Image (cartoon, rainbow, N blue to C red):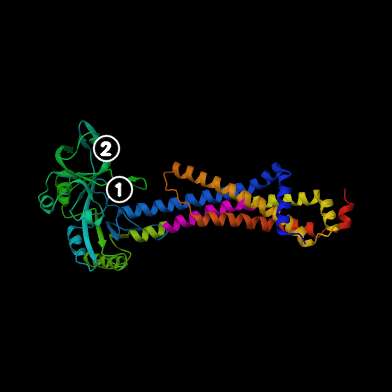
């Protein structure tokens, strides 16, 4: 019986005897493993980006917007309310926000009015999103002021001409100037910059820092032209006390608004969006996307395994006399089986290791190209190597069995 070290040595010697063919045989596994690693990393990066984007909107957050309708698949969709100038239905009011604040488990309610307008400063024009909010907006959206201060209830109530701007607006309008105390012009009016928001970065395709926050009353009376609809708002942000309470608060807010608007389920003129549910749905979608990419890439790994089987069958045919000679000298079927099996597994695992390195490199390139976080899981890397070894065992089993079953006399007779 041959020792294990002799079997490994013999298998390595056989592979080194024809390095080009060994490399080409492993190429299929290299491509397969690198594809799996790169695709799974890309999917994981997309999932991490979704989680980061949702988290940047605020934790334990419900968004109430005007209008609701059913799509073709029965999915409710918001019908408006956030467009410039207040497009959509005017079904939400300040009284709704006041009533929601009384719901058990709600710690902050921030009605807001979104609009678009041209902001001018230092001879530069810019078109950020302009949002009229109350001081509770910072708490509801987990936002902080990096410089200066936020406006207070008195300034909001008196519709003062003050604004707090995002980092993108600072970069565009005040690239080399401290913006605090400076004035910007919006729709012909002059507004003092009293604060700068901390950066939140991108949320999907939206730049969250490209924003100007002003008192809600200021936006309604002086900027958006919605003074005649002073009681309506385009959005209400509701922050629950905890994630566990979010589902109950969502239900209570929905029931409350149905009572106030005298609507029933399916006929609502508002939509309550639970960002945790949205986040969970998006995570499930990206997870399925990751599995799909990994599955497609695994097909190429199986194709690589077929290549190993093909080359191993050729190798058995070429080395028939060698097999017959070894059997004649006392080698057992199990020795031949282990030798050819080891050659197949060594080829596959070596391809897996090289494929892992290329996969990491490819993942880095793609996540950099798509501006996604690079997520590399040691578990996934280990599974890729183990799977490549399994491919070697699976597709090397038949050639090894065929070599082991050769009759030594018939094998020695073959040319």
Res 291 visible = no
Residue underneath mark 1: 200
Give SS at disc 1: loop
Q: Is residue 126 above or below residue 281?
A: above
Q: Position of residue 413 (x, y in %)?
A: 90, 52
Q: Does the magenta stretch include residue 296?
A: yes
Res 215 visible = yes
Left or right relative to 234: residue 366: right
Residue 399 marker: none
Determine which quarter of the picture holds residue 384. Answer: bottom right
Total marks placed: 2
Which residues are drawn in magenta?
283-302
Taking the spot 80% from the left edge, 48% from the top edge, the residue there is: 318
Q: Position of residue 243 (x, y in %)?
A: 31, 64
Taking the spot 79% from the left edge, 59% from the top edge, the residue there is: 404
Residue underneath mark 2: 171
Q: How far apart are marks 2 and 1 (CA)?
A: 14 Å
Q: Position of residue 406 (x, y in %)?
A: 83, 58
Taking the spot 73% from the left edge, 50% from the top edge, the residue there is: 310
């Amino acid at each position: 019986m041959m020792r294990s070290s002799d079997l490994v040595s013999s298998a390595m010697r056989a592979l080194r005897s024809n390095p080009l063919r060994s490399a080409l045989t492993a190429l299929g596994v290299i491509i397969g493993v690198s594809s799996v690693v790169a695709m799974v990393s890309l999917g994981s990066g997309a999932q991490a980006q979704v989680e980061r984007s949702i988290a940047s909107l605020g934790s334990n957050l419900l968004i109430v917007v005007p209008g609701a309708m059913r799509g073709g698949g029965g999915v409710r969709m918001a019908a408006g309310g956030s467009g410039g100038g207040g497009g959509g239905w005017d079904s939400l009011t300040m009284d709704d926000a006041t009533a929601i604040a009384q719901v058990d488990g709600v710690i902050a309610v921030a009605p807001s009015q979104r609009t678009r307008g041209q902001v001018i400063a230092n001879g530069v024009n810019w078109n950020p999103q302009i949002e009229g909010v109350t001081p509770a907006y910072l708490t509801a959206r987990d936002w902080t002021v990096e410089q200066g201060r936020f406006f207070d209830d008195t300034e909001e109530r008196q519709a003062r001409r003050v604004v707090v701007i995002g980092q993108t607006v600072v970069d565009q309008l005040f690239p080399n100037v401290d913006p605090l105390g400076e004035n910007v012009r919006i729709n012909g009016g002059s507004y003092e910059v009293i604060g700068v928001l901390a950066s939140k970065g991108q949320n999907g395709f939206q730049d969250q820092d490209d924003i100007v926050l002003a008192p809600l009353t200021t936006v309604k009376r002086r900027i958006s032209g919605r003074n005649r609809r002073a009681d309506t708002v385009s959005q209400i942000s509701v922050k629950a006390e905890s994630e566990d309470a979010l589902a109950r608060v969502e239900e209570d807010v929905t029931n409350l608004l149905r009572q106030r608007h005298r609507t029933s389920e399916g006929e609502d003129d508002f939509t309550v969006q639970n960002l945790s549910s949205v986040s969970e749905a998006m995570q499930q979608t990206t997870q399925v996307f990751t599995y799909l990419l990994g599955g497609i890439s695994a097909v190429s790994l199986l194709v690589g395994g077929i290549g190993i089987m093909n080359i191993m069958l050729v190798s058995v045919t070429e080395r028939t006399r060698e097999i017959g000679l070894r059997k004649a000298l006392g080698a057992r079927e199990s020795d031949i089986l282990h030798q050819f099996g080891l050659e197949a597994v060594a080829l596959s695992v070596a391809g897996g290791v090289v494929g892992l390195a290329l996969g990491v490199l490819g993942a880095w390139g793609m996540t950099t190209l798509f501006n996604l976080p690079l997520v590399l899981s040691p578990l996934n890397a280990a599974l890729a190597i183990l799977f490549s070894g399994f491919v070697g065992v699976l597709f090397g089993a038949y050639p090894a069995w065929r070599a082991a079953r050769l009759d030594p006399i018939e094998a020695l007779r073959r040319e």
